């Protein structure tokens, strides 16, 4: 079957700080997954929210959401464990109930509670081998007047895409990372396994749990990767941290359908040129999908595709003007 039509959503209120657009679909080409188990969440500065429910866009308003605060995320339900779409939908819905957060520890606390709550909820849906459903979660919290906060679980990714680079800002939660943390894989070997190729295996997911704390078994809690447990060459890419955005760059949150191919590093290396000159975030999302449709990378596997682009906007005169309206001198 041919690719689903792409619907790019960009009617969000993030100005004057950001420009945001997102799209999600079952896949590309004639061989596709039977359903879209990906999801995304957008809560804009006015509290208008958007996510997928039963593979359709659902919109709502988050009551009491503080003006000027935002939240964006992408999720990839783990279909191999069953109920992947339902797991991603449950986490997406849960994100709409978490209050606006202003520090990494505060955000992590609320998400740890959601993780444990959904583990209990899905306990009865575990497969015949006892594997729980799960989903990735790569999220940016956008405090009013503050720097973004990253929260990351799984093997979806955050990329910084500049004029000459596409730089991963997150670490995949995969067996190669676990091996590197135990000193069994060096930087070159890790990069070749994670970014030079693609494997569907995962070492941690939301709801599912983690295989980092004990590689021989699945543990219930989430295991945060940080400078305390990552090798030194990955220590700057902690899962839960404050980000400093570059005004000339765009930031892509995406699921692994975009690099599920034989040589993902080559395909990702095309992105800076692909996005150069794009007038807005919606055009960037459109170009990413067009590239994978029109010139797909060699060995592309059937997978769902979700891309969310956040583009910092340059400050303009008047953007931060005093909001108090005072009479002009000489006005009656």
Image (tube, rainbow, N blue to C red):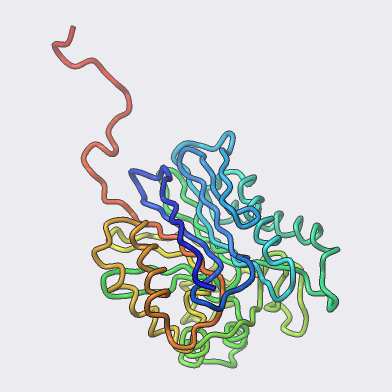
Q: Residue at x 70, y 55 (%)?
A: 114
Location of the C terminus (image quadrant): top left
The x and y percentages for residue 44 are 47, 44
Instruction: Decide: is 261 above or below 247.
Output: below
**Residue with the most extreme left position:** 330
The x and y percentages for residue 243 are 43, 60
Between 73 and 144, the one lying in front of the other is 73
Quarter assignment of residue 154? bottom right
The x and y percentages for residue 246 are 32, 61
**Residue with the most extreme front position:** 1
Location of the N terminus (image quadrant): bottom right
Quarter assignment of residue 245? bottom left
Q: Residue at x 83, y 63 (%)?
A: 123
Quarter assignment of residue 49? top right
Left or right side of 221 for 286: left
The x and y percentages for residue 212 are 67, 78
Instruction: Decide: is 102 above or below 36.
Output: above
Between 261 and 117, the one lying in front of the other is 261
Q: Residue at x 27, y 57 (%)?
A: 279
Q: Residue at x 46, y 67 (%)?
A: 158
Q: How many marks?
A: 0
């Amino acid at each position: 079957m041919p690719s689903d039509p792409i619907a790019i959503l960009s009617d969000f209120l993030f100005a004057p700080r950001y420009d945001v657009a997102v799209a999600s679909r079952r896949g590309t080409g004639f061989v596709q997954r039977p359903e879209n188990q990906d999801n995304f969440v957008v809560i804009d500065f006015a509290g208008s929210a958007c996510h997928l429910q039963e593979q359709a866009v659902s919109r709502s308003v988050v009551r009491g959401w503080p003006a000027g605060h935002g939240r964006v995320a992408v999720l990839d339900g783990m279909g191999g464990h069953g109920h992947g779409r339902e797991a991603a939908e449950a986490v997406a819905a849960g994100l709409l109930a978490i209050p606006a957060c202003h520090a990494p520890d505060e955000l992590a606390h609320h998400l740890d509670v959601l993780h444990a709550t959904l583990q209990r909820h899905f306990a009865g849906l575990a497969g015949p081998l006892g594997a729980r459903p799960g989903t990735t979660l790569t999220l940016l919290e956008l405090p009013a007047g503050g720097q973004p906060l990253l929260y990351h679980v799984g093997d979806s990714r955050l990329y910084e895409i500049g004029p000459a680079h596409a730089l991963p800002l997150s670490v995949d939660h995969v067996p190669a990372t676990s091996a590197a943390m135990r000193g069994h894989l060096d930087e070159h070997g890790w990069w070749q396994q994670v970014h030079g190729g693609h494997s569907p295996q995962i070492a941690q997911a939301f709801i599912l749990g983690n295989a980092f704390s004990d590689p021989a078994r699945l543990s219930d809690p989430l295991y945060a990767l940080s400078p305390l447990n990552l090798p030194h060459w990955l220590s700057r890419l902690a899962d839960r941290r404050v980000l400093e955005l570059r005004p000339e760059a765009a930031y892509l949150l995406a699921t692994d359908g975009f690099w599920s191919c034989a040589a993902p590093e080559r395909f990702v290396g095309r992105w800076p040129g692909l996005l150069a000159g794009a007038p807005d975030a919606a055009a960037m999302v459109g170009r990413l999908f067009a590239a994978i449709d029109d010139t797909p990378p060699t060995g592309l596997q059937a997978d769902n595709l979700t891309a969310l682009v956040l583009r910092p906007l340059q400050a303009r005169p008047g953007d931060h003007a005093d909001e108090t309206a005072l009479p002009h001198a000489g006005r009656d």
